[in-house]
Image (cartoon, helix red, strand yellow):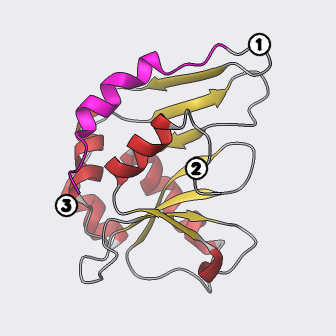
Amino acid sequence: MIQPDIAQLIDSIPTLSVADDSMPLYSAVLPPVPWDLAGVEQTLAVTLPPDVISLWEYVGTVRLFEDTTYGQWGLILWSPEQIMQNHPAELAWYPDDVRPGDLIIGEFLGDSERLLVRCDISQPDYGSIMVVLPLDPRSDWYTISNSLGNFLQEFIAHSGQKFWE
């Protein structure tokens, strides 16, 4: 499968806002922040997939299809700095389910679901994207894509709807 170009996907985000009277949805990207690849990988004990690296070289935080009225819909992809701050506490919520190389990179607004990328290069699921369900065991979590780029392409194509449900 051809991997989508992260830069092209990100460039399309400012045009993704949905002007729906019942629930207007807003999308935006914040500029990249300085970060240290080796430091992130060493501190978090992960090997970042190339499309995650590309994303963070191009932008900081990404907000997709956010319900700006009620805050009950949307996806926020965290910047490297936010992940460094959030990672230990996020993984602590799932002590029986986390594996080496799990990296939570974002949150779905309105519920407690998280977006996880597999960063254990020694495993066949390296780079895959999962949705972490807060009350369910890992066996019930959704594996929704083989890469961040493919996930973003699908999520954008579905206007922020949870296509995996």
Distance, label 2 to label 3, CA atoms, is 34 Å
Q: For the residues labelled 1 and 3, say whether their Cβ atoms are less than 8 Å apart.
A: no
Question: Residue extending furthest bottom?
Answer: 96
Instruction: Read off the magenta span.
Output: 1-19
Q: Quadrant of the C terminus?
A: bottom right
Amino acid under label 1?
Asp
Does residue 32 appear in this view? no
Amino acid under label 2?
Phe
Q: Residues within 10 Å of mark 3 (few under 14, many from 20)?
A: few
Name the residue beneath numbered marker 3.
38
Going from N to C along the chain, the mark reached first, 2 or 1, is 1
Amino acid under label 3?
Ala
Name the residue beneath numbered marker 1.
21
On screen, residue 61 above or below 13: below
Q: For the residues labelled 2 and 3, say whether their Cβ atoms are less than 8 Å apart.
A: no
On screen, residue 131 above or below 158: below
Give x and y (percent) for residue 102. Answer: 43, 72
Going from N to C along the chain, the mark reached first, 1 or 3, is 1
Going from N to C along the chain, the mark reached first, 2 or 3, is 3
Name the residue beneath numbered marker 2.
163
Q: For the residues labelled 2 and 1, say whether their Cβ atoms are less than 8 Å apart.
A: no
On the image, which quarter does residue 26 sit in? top right
Membership of 3 in magenta stretch: yes
Does residue 69 appear in this view? yes
Determine the secondary structure under disc 3: helix
Q: Is residue 133 left or right of residue 123?
A: right
* Disc assigned to residue 150: none
On screen, residue 55 above or below 64: below
Q: Quadrant of the N terminus?
A: bottom left
